[in-house]
Image (tube, rainbow, N blue to C red):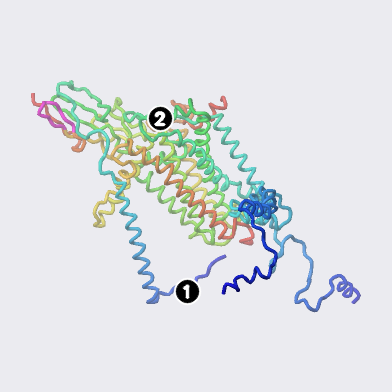
């Protein structure tokens, strides 16, 4: 048996000289080196290629299409688009404008969160500090404020545009419904947002808002006529919103969490759904869909 | 017959192929069973427009932030509301409604409007006038939307903003005893008007 | 783009019925669990000013005067031996009303009340609350905001 195992070495009469492990390593590196050098030379290109699989300067139709569907950010949009959809006077860019304002609001909002404390005895002074002792603090709050106001306008006019161009008609029904919910949520974001400075406007708006919710008692009181027990919808909702009977610390904290966490997540998810529905229902509406 | 021969010279028939060149049409992408369309590549046509819109949006918001800093009222005082106590402009229409009746103004009518808006595409299903502004075939729908939703919303906001003074009393703008709401004040204040 | 549902496949067979029931139970279970989480948000302890508070001795309130207790949003009025406590919270949407020559005016939505708290001008529909007053063993008067009494219910000072 031992003879057989010896056989390969018998076939090769030249005996390998004994080499030290260091020499072995040296040889291994020498053998692999050219490949590694090549890899290092190509490193920037390969890193770029792994992130973005298309040329940065697409020239042919194929490369231009690839630029869109190979990119994570751009693949949301179609690689080819109707000329009609690009006309500024058709959409006035209102939907995209709303999205941009939402992104600006997210960005400036996160920055503002670093300096804000949702406490009744601190919130207002944090607003003053933002203006006086934080670099660009006033500008950040200003951008947040103006983006919020502009977004409400942009969403409203976007809704009008969609109606006046008949873009809600089948098969786009659901997308219109999602859009209406987005409009309402934008208003709710505005409402929860202007409470946070805890100034006079904030306090009395939250008081009035909570009491409007409290008026839902009218529904449950009317339902008692049908033999149902009085559930006090309004009182329940008001207590849930304020965390108590009166506007105070609990209410500020609740509105803060709604404004910076819960509502943005819901809003973002609905925006994603809104976009997905645009693609799935054949892209942006076009006059070709209903010959007149 | 001579013409036919020439064609075959240019595009010689290969008997091994199951396909052949039929005709050459103008266009930039291969399509079957569809007439010519006016599609363009999103790169760069869409991308450049999006980039311009973002730049414009950013610059305008930044300019407003620099020019017209956001308002900040006095610290919250639970004992004493300001007079008049006005919400931001986008809720002044709602505030005007609420000043007539709390339940119907604050919940009833807005709720009906929102539910009504959501039902529009399920009621108005006629496939006409898509993709055109104010299509003639949809003039009824357009008028209804304008007169029931758009105009009332805007009018209510204008009344709430410019025609309501202390104790939510009705005052014409030229006779208003208090300063106009703070959002407009801050724009015009910033512009030095 | 339009999807045409196959009507026959929508038929409620025995198999579909059981499938639907199972998914229904699953869904109700999930939603029920979620709804129970709602209890998390119901305030068990409410922070804020105490609903019962002392306003001092009856002699602090001269006849015919209206005294405003700002922290509690309550007006104390005295007519002869009668002392009443009127809430200053507007019945419309909860703003604080301000005393005026005719009674109380609300700056938020324009409700008006007379000196007794009756509505004289909408949008408020009911008058301002009156609170019950009682005497503590120390002789001080106590207003209980949890005890809402009809308009014109006074505490009569025993002289």
Residue C141's quadrant in the figure? top left
Q: Is residue A52 left or right of residue B86?
A: right
Viewer-nearest residue: B159 or C19: C19
Give me the chain letter of mark 1.
Answer: C
Residue C28 vs C109, above or below: the answer is below
Q: Quadrant of the C terminus of chain C?
A: top left
Q: Disc 2 designates what residue? A: A124
Estimate the spatial distance between the alpha carbons at disc 1 and disc 2, rounded to whole Å.
Answer: 61 Å
Residue A7: x %, y % from top left: 63, 72
Residue at 36% across, 73% down: C18
Residue A217: x %, y % from top left: 29, 47
| Residue C136 among those drawn in magenta | yes
Viewer-nearest residue: C105 or A113: A113
Residue at 35% across, 59% down: C30
Give me the chain letter of mark 2.
Answer: A
Residue B169: x %, y % from top left: 39, 32
Residue B164 vs A17, above or below: the answer is above
Magenta region: which residues? C133-143
Q: Can residue A85 be seen by looking at this rendering? A: no
Q: Which class describes the residues within 10 Å of circle 1: few (<14), some (14-19), or many (20+)? A: few
Residue A198: x %, y % from top left: 39, 32
Residue C115 vs B30, above or below: the answer is above
For this orientation, the residue located farthest to the right is B2
Q: Can residue C50 be seen by looking at this rendering? A: yes
Which label sits on residue C7?
1
Marks 1 and 2: same chain?
no
**Callout 1: helix, strand or loop?**
loop
Q: Is residue A254 left or right of residue A183?
A: left
Residue C2's quadrant in the figure? bottom right
């Amino acid at each position: 048996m031992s003879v057989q195992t010896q056989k390969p070495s018998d076939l090769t009469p030249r005996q390998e000289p004994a080499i030290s492990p260091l020499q072995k390593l040296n040889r291994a590196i020498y053998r692999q080196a050219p490949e590694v050098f090549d890899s290092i030379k190509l490193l920037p290109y390969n890193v770029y290629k792994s992130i973005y699989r298309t040329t940065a300067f697409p020239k042919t139709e194929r490369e231009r299409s690839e630029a869109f569907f190979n990119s994570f950010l751009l693949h949301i949009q179609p690689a080819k688009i109707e000329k009609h959809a690009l006309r500024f006077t058709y959409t006035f860019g209102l939907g995209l404008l709303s999205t941009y304002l939402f992104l600006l609001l997210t960005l400036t909002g996160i920055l503002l969160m670093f300096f804000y404390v949702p406490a009744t005895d601190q919130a207002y002074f944090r607003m003053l500090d933002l203006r006086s002792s934080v670099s660009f603090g006033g500008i950040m709050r200003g951008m947040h404020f103006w983006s919020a106001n502009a977004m409400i306008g942009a969403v409203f006019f976007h809704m009008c545009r969609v109606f006046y161009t008949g873009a809600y008609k089948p098969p786009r029904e659901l997308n219109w419904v999602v859009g209406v919910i987005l409009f309402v949520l934008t208003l709710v974001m505005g409402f929860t947002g202007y409470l946070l400075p805890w100034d006079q406007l904030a306090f009395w708006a939250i008081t009035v808002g909570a009491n409007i919710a409290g008026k839902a008692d009218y529904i449950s009181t009317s339902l008692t006529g049908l033999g149902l027990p009085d559930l006090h919808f309004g009182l329940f909702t008001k207590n849930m919103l304020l965390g108590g009977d009166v506007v105070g610390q609990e209410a500020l904290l609740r509105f803060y969490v709604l404004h910076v966490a819960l509502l943005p997540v819901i809003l973002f998810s609905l925006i994603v759904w809104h976009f997905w529905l645009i693609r799935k229902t054949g892209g942006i509406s076009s006059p070709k869909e209903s010959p007149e | 017959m001579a013409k036919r021969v020439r064609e075959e010279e240019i595009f010689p028939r290969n008997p091994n192929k199951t396909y052949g060149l039929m005709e050459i049409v103008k266009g930039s992408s291969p399509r079957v069973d569809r007439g010519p369309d006016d599609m363009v590549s999103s790169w760069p046509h869409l991308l450049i427009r999006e980039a311009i819109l973002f730049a414009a949006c950013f610059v305008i918001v930044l300019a407003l932030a620099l020019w017209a800093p956001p308002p900040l009222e006095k610290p919250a005082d639970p004992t004493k509301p300001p007079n008049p106590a006005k919400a931001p402009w986008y809720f002044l229409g709602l505030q005007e409604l609420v000043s007539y009746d709390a339940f119907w103004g604050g919940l009833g009518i807005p709720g009906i409007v929102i539910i009504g808006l959501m039902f529009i595409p399920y009621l108005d299903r006629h496939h006409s006038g898509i993709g055109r502004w104010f299509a003639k075939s949809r003039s009824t729908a357009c008028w209804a939307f304008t007169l029931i939703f758009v105009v009332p919303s805007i009018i209510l906001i204008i009344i709430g903003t410019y025609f309501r003074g202390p104790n939510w009393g009705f005052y014409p703008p030229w006779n208003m005893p208090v300063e106009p709401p703070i959002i407009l004040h801050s724009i015009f204040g910033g512009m030095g008007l | 783009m339009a999807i045409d549902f196959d009507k026959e496949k929508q038929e409620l067979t025995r198999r579909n019925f059981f499938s639907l029931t199972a998914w229904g139970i699953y869904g109700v279970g999930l939603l029920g669990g979620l709804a129970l989480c709602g209890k998390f948000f119901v305030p068990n302890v409410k922070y804020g000013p105490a609903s019962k508070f002392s306003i001092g001795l009856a002699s602090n309130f001269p006849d015919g005067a209206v005294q405003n207790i700002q922290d509690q949003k309550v007006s104390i009025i005295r007519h002869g031996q009668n002392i009443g406590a009127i809430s200053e919270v507007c019945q419309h949407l909860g703003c604080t009303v301000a005393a005026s020559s005719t009674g109380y005016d609300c700056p938020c939505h324009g409700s008006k009340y007379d000196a007794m708290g009756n509505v004289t001008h909408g949008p408020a529909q009911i008058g301002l609350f009156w609170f019950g007053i009682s005497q503590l063993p120390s002789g001080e008067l106590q207003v209980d905001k949890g005890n809402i009494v009809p308009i014109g219910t006074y505490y009569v000072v025993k002289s």
